[in-house]
Amino acid sequence: MEPYRIKVVEPLALTTPQQRQEALRRVSYNLFDLRADEVTIDLLSDSGTGALSAAQLAAGMAGDESYAGSRSFYRFHETVSDLTGYAHILPVHQGRAAERVLFSSLLSPGSTVLSNTHFDTTRANVELAGCTARDLPCPQAADLDSDQPFKGDIDLDALRDALETATPGSPVAAVVMTVTNNGGGGQPVSMENLRRTAELCRLHRVPLILDAARFAENAWLVTRREPGYQDRTPRQVAEEAFRLADGCVMSAKKDGIVHIGGFIGLNDTELAQKCERLLIATEGFSTYGGLAGRDLDMLAQGLTEVTEPGYLAERADIAAHLAQRIRAVGVDIVEPAGLHALYLNAGRLLPHVPPHRYPGHALACRLYLDGGIRSAELGSLYLGEEDEDGNPVKSAPYELVRLALPRRVYTRSHYDHVARTLEHIAKNADSVHGYRVVDQSPILRHFSIKLAPAD
């Protein structure tokens, strides 16, 4: 059972199929543009969508809103320093701000950043710095159905080759390890893989940076799956992971269980000073970084709650419950199931919809039409490219739909509704049609794209 009781409730938005059809037409079939009060179950993202605890709200009431040197900052700083061990901690308003500040300070145009998998904003911030973002997922990640425990790992052979063949004219500026690997199906990274990555980075004098948005969930899966870690606590595993890297960026809207906030952690004093100067110019003074004091206090409390075994066990259990229900209705997911999201294999469910007609997006739209459920496509709409006539130039390797699970928000009966909706769709999969692009942005197009049903 959930290790908490509910103290405050919010009504769900209950709409009719006709209302949902009209809403989709109005937003040109872009689920990001739906109003929240048009969505019944919102699984678009787990970022900033969790429920605060009573202790977090109480901490927020003690927030010190002094412009500089607030008590809230020092409580936050102590908590993050104890967790990560980094010498320099800079607060920011969210993860993409951390990426922008760090990459603007660390990267030079023409260099390359290697990763197990860059997520969308990470890739965008690397490219905006004039650099190349290159993914090196491990070979096991290619088999969506296997029960391999650490498909989030980086390919160590490919990493070694990339580091050894880099030249002064095209250097590797950093290695970013995303834990858990969101773009790779929410799969965890093993401590062995992280340790060997750190050794390669030290050998080639390339900084290793953690994208630590879901560090606690990665740590929990390590304690469940990796030999030698069964007797370790998630907190102990997390502390070890942070100390293997040279620094981190974190969107605390995930495993900080807050609605806004993040941080940069670094050991390099010179780099930290460059980041601090940019932070002050663009985010806010270095002791608030664009956050209110109450946000810093709630974040500090969230970082202590997120590694509690009871909290993580329940989060894993509810994800497993939904995964079992989805499998039972005949829809495949990326295996094994993780914690923060489940990834539906839309390409397999809708083989009649070609990649350039976006089967993932088609499934996401049908989930909304049939059940009021909002989700996120991670397929050829997210990763693909077409020419000006709409012909495919590049398709994604897999056509997925992410069901992101907000923290402490929905109960099992809510997720049973999701499974029942998928069951109805699976029984009528031939009726699901594809979409074509009407208008798009040249970068991060999935956020603002406009589509229409395909002819």
Image (cartoon, rainbow, N blue to C red):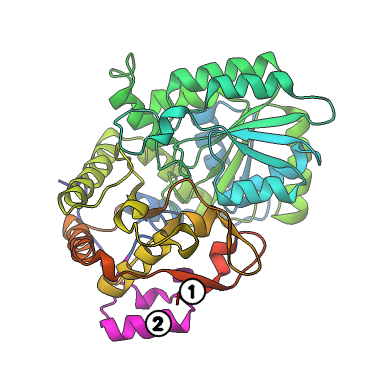
Is 229 on the left-hand or right-hand side of 63? left
Residue 278 vs residue 369, the one in the foreground: 369
Q: Is residue 77 magenta?
A: no
Residue occupying the point 57% across, 49% down: 95
Residue occupying the point 62% across, 17% down: 200
Q: Which label belongs to residue 23? A: 2
Is 69 on the left-hand or right-hand side of 276? left
Q: Which label belongs to residue 33? A: 1
Q: At label 2, which amino acid type do we have?
A: Ala
Q: Which residues are magenta?
A: 12-41
Q: Quadrant of the C terminus?
A: bottom left
Residue 275, image x and y in percent?
74, 41
Residue 338, image x and y in percent?
32, 40
Examine the image and state in which quarter residue 237 appears.
top left
Q: Is residue 25 magenta?
A: yes
Please tell me how crowded label 2 is: few (under 14), some (14-19), or many (20+) other residues with Cα within 10 Å: some
